[in-house]
Amino acid sequence: MTAPLPGIAVAPNTAAPVLPGFEHMRRFWDPTHGCMTVKVLPGEFYVSAQEEMVSTVLGSCVSACIRDNERGIGGMNHFMLPEPLGAERNDWSAAVGRAARYGSDAMEQLINAILKAGGKRESLTVKIFGGGRVLAQMTDVGQRNIAFVRRYLETESLPLVAADVGDIYPRQLQYFPASGRVRVRQLRSQRDAELAASEQRYLKRLANDPIKGEVELF
């Protein structure tokens, strides 16, 4: 296949397929940005090695954008809680059910997927976003997520090159793995309340699923 000319958007019917393991992700053509776009929801992650955009909306959740800068392979995760509590922390069988809902799982799965796609650990850099205090009636999940991801990066010796975390506002995040560029927009409208309600519903689903005793609601 002939490579597209620089600056020319690839038509939807000629876009390269996703990497193995991500066929289930919702992917669509974005005429505004002239590229394919993938939306990452809470508990999901996505890795790409082509010109496309990965987007999400963050409240108290945190997303890490991790990229091999030499090979142009990068991805994004989206997690609501930092890590499981108690016995679940060391329960391998529970990890399968947890998927990427916890930061501890989301970080490992994203990094492993980048390495599987051809990335090298020594070339990885990280940008982190989110962790806003949008759930006023609950403990500050956002700050817990921020503290977790900073601690994780320090423990794993992964360089943090950019961060936009904390505050009280939700964020819309647009990430371009091929270049590493990130666009962040604070949401200060009625979507604040909508997102807070959505995160509450997500937390309640976690509290009511088969993995018990890990979510505290106030």
Image (cartoon, rainbow, N blue to C red):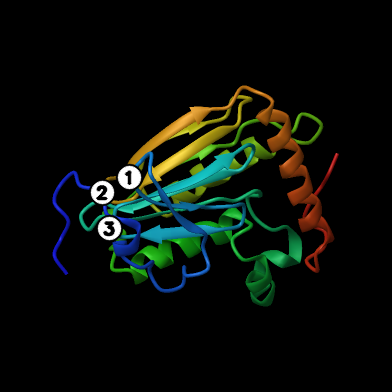
| Residue position for label 3 | 122
Instruction: Sort mark 3 into few (<14), some (14-19) or many (20+) by Cα contacts within 10 Å.
Output: few
Q: Are marks 1 and 2 in contact (CB under 8 Å)?
A: yes
Instruction: Sort mark 2 into few (<14), some (14-19) or many (20+) by Cα contacts within 10 Å.
Output: some
* Among the two numbered marks 1 and 2 on one chain, the one whose residue lies closer to the N terminus: 2
* Residue shown at the point (29%, 53%) measured from the top left: 51
Q: CA distance from mark 1 to mark 3?
A: 32 Å
* Residue shown at the point (25%, 55%) measured from the top left: 72
Can residue 23 be spotted in the picture?
A: yes
| Amino acid type of the residue tagged 1 in the rendering | Gly
| Residue position for label 2 | 9
Give the quadrant of residue 106.
Answer: bottom right
- Tell me residue 1's x, y (percent): 17, 69
Q: Which mark is residue 126?
A: none
Q: Which mark is residue 34?
A: 1
Q: Nearer the viewer, residue 205 or 191?
A: 191
* Among the two numbered marks 2 and 3 on one chain, the one whose residue lies closer to the N terminus: 2
- Tell me residue 21's x, y (percent): 46, 72
Describe residue 101's horizontal placement relative to residue 214 as left or right: left
Can residue 127 be spotted in the picture?
A: no
Describe residue 49's horizontal placement relative to residue 188 as left or right: left
Helix, strand or loop at mark 3: helix
Give the quadrant of residue 74.
Answer: bottom left
* Among the two numbered marks 1 and 3 on one chain, the one whose residue lies closer to the N terminus: 1
* Residue shown at the point (40%, 34%) measured from the top left: 183
| Amino acid type of the residue tagged 2 in the rendering | Ala
Q: Nearer the viewer, mark 1 or mark 3?
A: 1
